[in-house]
Amino acid sequence: MSKLFDTLERLAATIEARKGGDPATSYTAKLLADPALAAKKLGEEAIETVIAAVAQSPDALASESADLLYHWLVLLAASDVSLDAVADKLAAREGTSGLAEKASRDGS
C-alpha cells in the first residue's frame, strides 16, 4: 500500500504546483480553475471504472482507477480539501460498522 500512497502524495504535490497555471497549456490547471468541470470529469471516470470492473478487465480497471484517482485528487485540490482532511474523516470512522456509520449520516 505504501507504493500507492507514495504515488498519490507525489501526484497531489504536482497537482498543487499546477494551481494558478495557464489553463490553455495545462489540463490540470484547466480542471483546477473550474471545480464543476473537475467534478464532472471525476464522475465520468467513476463510470468508466465501473464499466471496466463489470467487464472484468484487470488492466482496464487498473487504468481507469488511475484516472479516477487523478481526477479525485484534482477535485480535492480545486476545492481546497487536503488529503489530511480526508484521512481525518476515515480515521474517525475506524472501528465503526459500515452499516452503522452510513445510518448515522443519512438517518436510515
Image (cartoon, grey):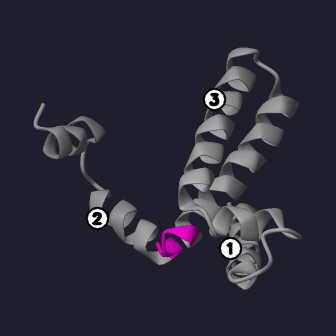
Label ID, residue 47: 3
Q: CA distance from mark 3 to mark 1?
A: 22 Å
Query: Badge 2: how crowded within 10 Å, few (<14), some, or many (20+)?
Result: few
Indicate which disc, 2 or 1, sits on the residue closer to the N terminus.
Answer: 1
Residue 94 screen position, x and y as percent: 32, 58
At a point 57% along the width and 71% down the height, the residue shown is 77
At a point 71% along the width and 30% down the height, the residue shown is 48
Give the residues in magenta: 78-83
In the displayed image of the protein, which residue is found farthest to the left? Answer: 107
Q: Are marks 3 and 1 in contact (CB under 8 Å)?
A: no
Is residue 30 positioned above or below 82 on the image?
above
Residue 31 screen position, x and y as percent: 68, 61
The quadrant the N terminus occupies is: bottom right
What's under tag 3, amino acid-wise?
A: Ile
Pair 2/1: label in front? 1
Label ID, residue 33: none
- Please name whichever residue, 19 or 59, is drawn nearer the observer in this view of the structure: 19
Label ID, residue 12: 1
The residue identified by callout 2 is 92
Q: CA distance from mark 2 to mark 1?
A: 22 Å
Query: Badge 1: how crowded within 10 Å, few (<14), some, or many (20+)?
Result: many
Residue 96 magenta: no
At a point 74% along the width and 71% down the height, the residue shown is 29
Secondary element type, mark 1:
helix
Secondary element type, mark 2:
helix
